[in-house]
Structure formats: structure tokens, C-alpha cells
Image: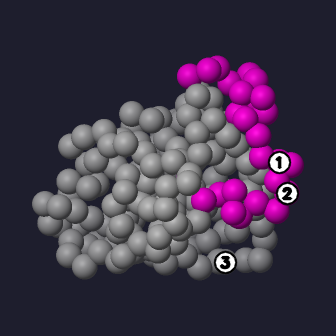
Amino acid sequence: MAVREILKMGDPRLLRVAQPVQAFGTPELLALVDDLHDTMVAARGAGLAAPQIGVDLQVVLFGFERNDRYPDAPPVPRTVLVNPVISTLSDAEDEGWEGCLSVPGLRGLVPRWSRIRYQGLDEQGRAIDREAEGFHARVVQHECDHLIGRLYPTRMRDLTKLGFTSVLFPEMDAQQSDD
Ligand code: NI
């Protein structure tokens, strides 16, 4: 259990396609999930993916009751998702502002599928199969993108909508926007 260093954009380890997890409930996997949790909480993140702490495995963690970095976002169930598969439930897209702990201090307007189904396993190998929409769907898509080497700026269609959080959202206090 430890707060780990979060890799930043430019580190080639963020560009890898992560390996699937083969063994569940192992001390190694449980320790990874603990580290993701501790690191996400310390950074006040809405989610964190294993590649962001340099671990080349298909593991993401997301969810919160209330998040300082996205004060208007509805709660998202706290979830460990391993070996995820996402499918779309409609052609509809939403645009929304995203940040990333690997892209500190910036926000960008990113199109995402509005409604998705996501499937995978938890750290014990129990199946997860959910439908999600809105911010929940956005978080899942953002985190799972980390498992295929994609950071949100590469999903943007209009780079004039990329900027510093402190400039775009001056009402957010420094603690919320310093990531
Ligand atoms: Ni991210």
C-alpha cells in the first residue's frame, strides 16, 4: 500500500497497450489495486489506470461519492475493473470537459459515447457487466483508453478547446485545479 508516482504525458509507458491480467485474487494484484486506490485518493482523482503508475496491466479503478476535481459530477460507483471490454449502446455522443492526472493542470473538451456497456472482472475474478451513461460512461471510457495507450488529447477534435484549468474554470480554487 503506497502512493505511487503518476507518470506524465510524454512518458512512453503511457503509450503501451496493456497486458491482460491472468491470475486473480493474488497478493500482487491486490497490492496493485491498493496502490491505485491510495494514489487516486491522494491525487483526488475520479479514476486511475495501472499504466499511469507504470504497471503494464489492464486494471483501472474509478468512482467517487463526490469529487473535488469534478464538483458537478454525479456519483460513480467505486469500481475495480480488470480486462475491460466496452461496447456502445447508441450512436449518440456527448462532449464534456476532462482532465487527467497524467496531463496535470489542463482540461479539454472531449467527445465520448453517451451510453455504453462495460464488461470485465474485479480483482477477485468476479464478473462485472454494467450499462452506463453520462459522466459514469465518460470516466470508464477515459480510464480504459489508458489501457490502449490513449490520452484524452488524442480523442479531441478541436484543440482550441484545450487549456489550463485555472484559465478555463477560474471559479475552481487552486487546490482543485493544480492537478
Ligand atoms: Ni487519465
Secondary structure, mark 3, is loop
* Contact? badges 1 and 2 (CB < 8 Å): yes
Quadrant in which the N terminus is drawn? top left
Q: Mark 1 and mark 2: span between their CA atoms?
A: 6 Å
Q: Which sits in the foreground, 175 or 135?
A: 175
Single out the mark in the foreground, 3 or 2. Answer: 2
Secondary structure, mark 1, is helix
Quarter of the image holding residue 5?
Answer: top left
Residue at the (26%, 73%) spot, across then down: 125
Q: Residue 161 carries which label?
A: 1
Q: Name the residue under label 3.
A: 89
Q: Does the residue labelled 1 lie within 8 Å of ligand 1?
A: no
Inspect the magenta stretch and tell me whether residue 66 lies in it: no
Disc 3 or 2, which lies upstream in sequence?
3
Single out the mark in the foreground, 3 or 1. Answer: 1
Q: Please tell me whether residue 159 is drawn above or below residue 44 in the rendered image.
A: below
Residues shaded magenta: 151-175
Residue at the (78%, 29%) spot, across then down: 167
Secondary structure, mark 2, is loop
Q: Mark 3 and mark 2: span between their CA atoms?
A: 25 Å
Q: Mark 2 points at which residue?
A: 158
Q: Where is residue 24 in the image (x, y as percent from the top left)?
A: 21, 71
Image position of 167 (left or right of 143): right
Image position of 135 (left or right of 91): left
